[in-house]
Amino acid sequence: MNQTTIKKSFIIKDGCGLHSGEKTDLYFFPAPENHGIVFYRGDKKVRIPASYQYAKSSALCTTIESEGVEVTTIEHLLSVCNGLGIDNLLVELHNLEVPIMDGSGYDFYAALQEVGLKQLDTPKKVVKVLEPVTYACNDINIFVLPSDKSNFTFSIDYDHRQIGQQEVTFQLTEKNYVENIAKAKTFGFRKDYQQLLNQGLVKGGNNKNAIILDEKGNIENMEEMTWLNEPNLHKILDQVGDFYLANNHRIIGDVFCHKSGHSTHLAFIRYMMDECPESFAVIDYD
Ligand SMILES: [Zn+2]
């Protein structure tokens, strides 16, 4: 299978950042072989590859940085790129944060699908897991095992009546991603909202772009949900996005995450790529 990019450039206008609350346009450009997924801060004239080597640890979103310039909340767009098998893409914006859109990956998927993908002349590369890698931090566990498929399992455990303990296993193919993951919206707890606002976060959050879980164990905006286990599916969406920080190569292996988030996903990828080089091989994808 060969690498891909988009057929032509396009713009998504006037999206709003989840945390900054600021509006920005996103410009998408085709990119050549082995370019990877790269963000370009047009206002600062700085390019930042969407790779773990440029990523910064942050609890509520995935951020990349170069020359002191950041792009934040890249994870949902990165997830769609992994889901659709897009290897090369240049995304320009003139602000800090990638827009949240409807809180899922669907708007990015729809726009990329409409413009279409183009095959390039160079083989697609994947990260093939050869040996187990495990990582633990307090009650968070992440591990990968060798497999011929790209499987993602996420288990959550929230003190909330409608959520509680759940686990989902998902095999990453384009069809499965589009049908079962792309529409899964982000979620948040009502009890955290004011505190996050006080910290200057979630200024662009609302009951259209996030599923809101209240203190009584209810979901405030059930009408926004596509699936009853949507928060768990959104954790898979985030996982698929964050794991594409492995230099934009899809991981071929069984990936298990328990209660992890963006910062521990990044820590795991960094550990595997930099400290466990014998555990994987970057190979051409059949
Ligand atoms: Zn997310």
Image (cartoon, grey):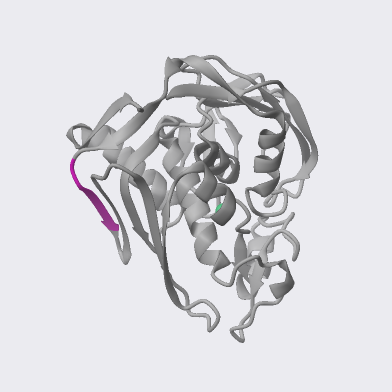
Viewer can see residue 207 = yes
Residue 50, given in percent of the width and then of the height, sits at: 51, 31
Question: Which region is colored magenta?
Answer: 131-136
Question: In the figure, is residue 217 to the left or right of 273?
Answer: right
Residue at 33% x, 40% y is 252
Q: Residue at x 26, y 45 (%)?
A: 147
Above-or-below relation of 2 to 255:
above
Report whether 135 appears left or right of 100: left
Q: Quadrant of residue 9?
A: top right
Residue 132: say if magenta: yes
**In which quadrant of the rendered image does the N terminus lie?**
top left
Q: Residue placed farthest to the right in the image?
A: 14
Residue 106 falls left or right of residue 255: right
User: Which is nearer the eye, 214 or 68?
Assistant: 214
Query: Residue 4 location in percent, x, y?
Result: 53, 24
Residue 98 shows in this picture: no
